[in-house]
Amino acid sequence: MSKTITRLGLAAAVASAGVMAPGAMAVAKELKFAHFVPARHHIDSKVVRPMSVELAKLSGGKLTIKIFPGGALGAGPREQFKRAINRVADITFGLQGYTSKQFPRTLLAELPNIGSSPQDMTKRMWKALPQIQADYKDVKILGLWMTDFTVLVSKNKPITKLSDLKGLKIRTPSALAGGLLKKWGAIPVPMPAPKIYQAFQTGIVDAVFIGGSGIRSFKLQEVGKYYTTGLPQTFTSQFLVMNKDSYKELSAGEKKQLDSLTGLKISLAGATAYEKAGVSTMKFVEKGGGKIVKLSADEAKKFSTAADAYVGEVIAAREKAGIKAKAIVGALKGKM
């Protein structure tokens, strides 16, 4: 009899513990973060990892991020946005320009002569978020930012005037930037950054249109010799997005913790990391023997005049396609 009572008591104790456990101890959550750049890249070391450390601290280790760099969860920079939608990873980083058709609104921010710096353009993008939100209907936006100033890198001859671009095959990061290069007389060749080195080295492209920081990140200084600056200000857009269900499954407290570290805050951190890397890279390139070419005022004006004409053409084409481009560009150019 006593043994039976003992067994019943033990069973009751176990059952009671099982009921209390979920409330007494929250299960730790680990979010998978995928990106395609090396772990040494500034977007990983200066932006993503610091954020993941802060999130772990805020949550007491109950919400953490595991980073998979260098395409560890799937090769191909173009698939980054889709990986978030399909939950191959909970969070992904990538460039809108690699799949330009998916971002007809956002990429208007890459038009020339709108903002003055990566940070300025990032703030402008967030200000225009209501107008571009439709591009992100399938994901939760964690970050949107613009990279550093654009440089034309060439290896056989310096680009000192607009006419030098005629007939040159130039790598472009997006269709929109490609249209600008075409307006300048070049032949645009769309290509994700990890593929540039070989294409540049083997002559598939004659020059590269890229944010200054990308030169060192992808070792283009080993191939390029001339670096043309002073072009109309254009910046490349990037995203940090999360699977919608992954976000929904977070508790209210976890959402608050993640939200406090993302949004405009992490976006400005991304923009600043790129700007610093761009300045550092140009010093590195010059120290290594690279020739920095600064456009003359007259030539810079020629580039800018052609760029302004291109902006008008893009807005008209987008409007014809049903995109409210005038309103979007107006919001981007509005007073800060």
Image: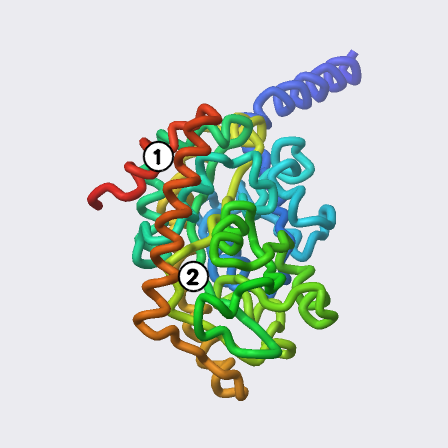
Identify the residue at image location x=76%, y=18%.
7
Vertical comparison of 206 with 64: above or below: below
- Residue closer to the observer: 60 or 232: 232
- Disc number placed over residue 328 in the picture, else none: 1
Q: What is the quadrant of residue 328 in the picture?
A: top left
Identify the residue at image location x=35%, y=66%.
300
Residue type pointed to by label 2 = Asp
- Residue closer to the observer: 23 or 7: 23
Identify the residue at image location x=43%, y=61%.
148
Q: What is the quadrant of residue 301 in the picture?
A: bottom left
Look at the image and name its color scheme: rainbow
Percent across and percent down for residue 191 are 64, 54
Vertical comparison of 249 with 306: above or below: above
Q: What is the quadrant of residue 330 in the picture?
A: top left
Q: Label 1: state its secondary structure.
A: helix
* Horizontal arrangement in the rendering, residue 214 relative to residue 73 (left or right): left
Dot placed on the residue nearer the N-terminal end, 1 or 2 = 2
Identify the residue at image location x=56%, y=40%.
100
Q: Which residue is mark 2?
A: 148
Percent across and percent down for residue 302 are 36, 62
Vertical comparison of 225 with 62: above or below: below
Tell me the distance, in whole angstroms, between the alpha carbons under discs 1 and 2. Answer: 21 Å
Percent across and percent down for residue 241 are 52, 39
Quadrant where the N terminus sits is top right
Residue type pointed to by label 1 = Ile
